[in-house]
Image: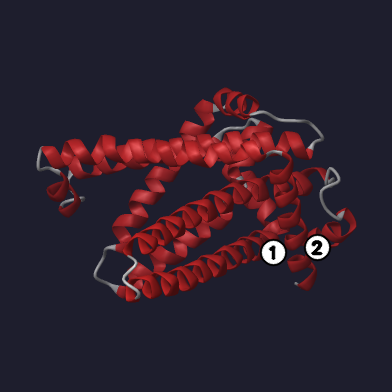
């Protein structure tokens, strides 16, 4: 297990090096966030205007509620997976020794748009089911829904790179991702937790330091400075989220690339990672 943790850190460092080489990869999570915001506005604002949103949410078991809920999940997932596919495609080009552009990533995602939509439809179905299950009164049902959600996320961890690189359909990509899980489960879990912990700690540090400075400025009655510090804290959190999301996509590409090719493209210690994958 220790070798797997070492390997995950090697792959995280590789992800950082890829991001250093291609800072334009940060554009893809930005596009994803904008797309998700537009989708949410496109669904929620009209429903609020028609006084339908609360009734549909309250009665999600109705046909109308299920249709609207599924449509919302479908469009949202498609936007997210499309941006992730573009990011993974560009990162894979770099791992293979190329020099990707934003256009390369977007074109690669577009060429697999049908399969991305298919995976979005499957994920929307799963997401809607888990969402309904998580709202049940039974604690056991909610727990099982949470565990099922975790299992789904782990099993589909490599679906996006598989869709982009291998060009298979969504069902085959899910099966392939589950197969690779046997070789990469340690890197998936430890790498994801490690990045989450690092960025979480940085976020907490920003909160503590920024909060203390704001409290001090308020105590000194310097409200203008307090507002500026608050704005800087918000920018710092957004930047952390952006970098974390980008590294997450690159990390998926790195895990998949080594699991399938056994090569690191000069970005990580191949011998160390190879022992972990065995």
Q: For residue 257, say whether it is visible.
A: yes
Name the quarter where the N terminus is drawn. bottom right
Residue 215 versus residue 40: which sits nearer the camera? 215
Please name the residue that numbered disc 1 is placed on: 186
For image coordinates 78% across by 59% down, the residue present is: 10
For image coordinates 14% across by 50% down, the residue present is: 54
Q: Quadrant of residue 13?
A: bottom right
Q: How is the image coloured?
A: secondary structure
In the image, residue 61 above or below residue 2 = above
Q: For residue 162, say whether it is visible.
A: no
Q: Position of residue 119 (x, y in %)?
A: 49, 38
Of pointers 1 and 2, the one earlier in the residue sequence: 1
Q: Position of residue 32 (x, y in %)?
A: 47, 39
- Crowding around mark 1 (Cα neighbors within 10 Å: few <14, some 14 to 19, many 20+) is many
Is 66 placed left or right of 103 in the picture?
left
In the image, residue 137 above or below residue 96 = below
Q: Position of residue 29 (x, y in %)?
A: 52, 42
Q: Position of residue 143 (x, y in %)?
A: 39, 70
Is 54 placed left or right of 26 in the picture?
left
Residue 276 numbered tag: 2
For image coordinates 55% across by 37% down, the residue present is: 28
Residue 222 versus residue 93: which sits nearer the camera? 222
Is 29 placed left or right of 274 in the picture?
left
For image coordinates 65% across by 48% down, the residue present is: 252
């Amino acid at each position: 297990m220790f070798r797997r943790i070492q390997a995950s850190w090697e792959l995280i460092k590789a992800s950082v090096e890829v991001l250093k080489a291609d800072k334009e990869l940060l554009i893809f999570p930005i596009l994803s966030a904008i797309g998700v915001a537009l989708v949410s506005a496109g669904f929620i604002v009209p429903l609020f205007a028609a006084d339908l949103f609360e009734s549909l949410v309250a009665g999600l078991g109705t046909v109308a509620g299920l249709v609207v809920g599924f449509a919302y999940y479908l469009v949202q997932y498609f936007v997210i997976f499309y941006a992730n596919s573009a990011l993974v495609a560009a990162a894979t080009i770099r791992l293979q020794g190329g020099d990707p552009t934003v256009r390369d990533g977007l074109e690669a995602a577009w060429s697999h748009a049908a399969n991305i939509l298919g995976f979005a439809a499957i994920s929307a179905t799963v997401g809607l089911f888990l969402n309904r299950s998580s709202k049940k009164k039974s604690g056991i049902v909610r727990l099982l829904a949470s565990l099922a959600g975790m299992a789904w996320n782990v099993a589909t961890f490599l679906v996006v790179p598989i869709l982009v690189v291998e060009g298979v359909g969504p069902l085959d990509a899910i099966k392939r991702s589950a197969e690779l899980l046997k070789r990469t489960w340690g890197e998936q879990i430890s790498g994801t937790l490690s990045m989450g912990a690092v960025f979480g700690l940085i976020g907490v540090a920003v909160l503590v330091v920024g909060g203390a400075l704001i409290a001090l400025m308020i105590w000194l009655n310097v409200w203008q400075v307090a507002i500026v510090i608050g704005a800087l804290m918000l920018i710092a959190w957004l930047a952390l989220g952006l970098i974390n999301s980008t590294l997450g996509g690159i990390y998926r590409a790195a895990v998949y690339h080594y699991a399938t090719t056994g090569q690191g493209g000069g970005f990580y210690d191949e011998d160390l990672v190879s022992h972990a994958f065995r």
